[in-house]
Amino acid sequence: MKSLLRALAVASVLTVVVSNGYAGDLDDLLARLPETANTVCVVNVKAMRSLSSDSPEGYQIVAGAIVPPAVDIILYGTQLVPGELNTRKTCGVVKLNRPATISDVVGRTSGSISEFSGTQVVVNPTKGYYAMLKPDLVAFGRQVTRQEFARWYQFARGNEKVVVSKYLAGAVDGTDAPMVGAIDMENQLDPMRVHDKLVLSKTMEGFSKEDIAKTAALISGMRGVTMTVRGKALDEAEVRFDFAEPVGDRADLVKFLFSETVNGMGVSLPEFAAGKAVADGNTVKLTTKLSDDGLMLIMSMFMPPVPSPKPAKEPTLEANGVSLQATQKYFNRVNQIVDDVRKKTKNAVSADDLGVTIDRYNKAYQQFDTAAKQIDGTPARYVDPDMLKYGENMAAKLHTCAMSMHGVIVDVKAMQSGMAYLATGGIWGGSIDSNVAATRQKQAEAVAADANRRNEILFSLDSDRREILRLMNERYKADFSKPIR
């Protein structure tokens, strides 16, 4: 199913809020979020570090994203529109445990400084906008315009009252879970549109018109969804669906609709379909064991790179201000991400069963997209500028492969001329076709037709790697294929 009740899945897949000992800080941080945010995301990096025995004071890998040791909390406020998941206006703040400056942010994000009404703002074409609210508090904006960021920044500087909905604020209050999240669903779903999508739902096959109508009324009256993740390994997940009317015996139905919608979005999370759903009044609680890949898929959709201040001890720098160690670490990390995603997507080929084919393509899309975002989040301080361009190029190519897995025809020549991708088609994300089987067949055909161009891109990654290795070895008279000390 292509778009069925996307908000039902997005509610838990795209929402993570973290508490655990930061009630006062969270009240202050939540007051910075705009009223238009219907999704809140807080990542309590400090709490996560306390769960790890591996270098708790160093860099923390959170669901595949590298977070610097100076970061304690990341808070996101997103305006989410069901059915338009590629457009998520996000404003948020990063709480640091040490002071930073705008120059530190420039170094972390590889951006440039611009003046916004007398305020210095770091601008990066892919990573968004960053500005200092306080020495230990950084504001950031993603997928917002220059004007939108400037106006929100002025609001965030002085506002002291939480203006996001009571549902979102209540999801944070009093929880002791390392991770918990919420999306405000009130008045968000159109009953007629929900009904039309349920008619096409595979889960609803065999149900009477009356049952479909009742289920549509239940879902369109949803108040909100929260998600908590517990356990030392962050693998105990609970999704809570809050409705305006009693659920009755429809707990499993809600679970299967949710799982079907997640799969239709290109996010492979089979653990939710195998989870246990229990109804209690107007609420359904879905519990499951969350795999490492599952956590990574959820977090990758919300984890943009975060700025970090200078380390306590500066590394040895070359005359051009570059650290050979940092440059090599960046090179190795990017290569590791690329090699890993190529292995994972190697078997993303069509099968005899159309449903299996679509699931494979959706999973490959998410894996490519996740890898591209991981490269964007790799620490870039003191890294050679040409090496950073190499990383950005690799991320752009992986993102292009992701789009290709969603039916976008890739123009390789356009890519080589500096464009990330050229969309000359695309099936996912459009309006629902009344003939579901035919639409899914078109999806599969579009992805298969672009296989050769996709392979060209993947093969070019090897030549890109050889070229940057040659350039670095020549420039610094050092062998980057071996450890540099």
Image (cartoon, rainbow, N blue to C red):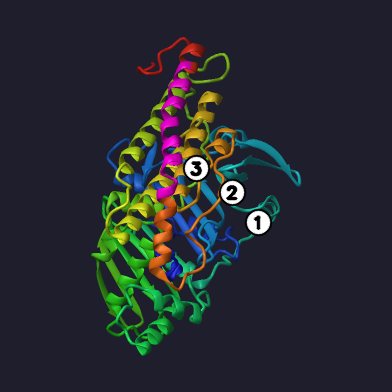
- Mark 2 vs mark 3, CA separation in Å: 12 Å
Residue 404, given in percent of the width and then of the height, sits at: 46, 48
Tag of residue 305: 3
Front residue (pair 342, 309) = 342
Q: Identify the residue position indicated by label 2 in the image.
A: 139
Identified by mark 2, the residue type is Ala
Identified by mark 1, the residue type is Trp
> From this viewpoint, which residue is outermost toward the top?
477
Q: Identify the residue position indicated by label 1 in the image.
A: 152
Residue 103, given in percent of the width and then of the height, sits at: 61, 33
- Image quarter where the N terminus lies is bottom left
Q: Which of marks 2 and 1 is nearer the N terminus?
A: 2
Marks 2 and 1 in Cβ contact (< 8 Å)? yes
Q: Does the magenta stretch include residue 112?
A: no
Front residue (pair 34, 384) = 384
Above or below — where is 112 with respect to 484? Answer: below
Residue drawn at x 29%, y 43% is 52
Residue drawn at x 33%, y 72% is 202
Residue 358, given in percent of the width and then of the height, sits at: 35, 57
Above or below — where is 173 with respect to 46? Answer: below
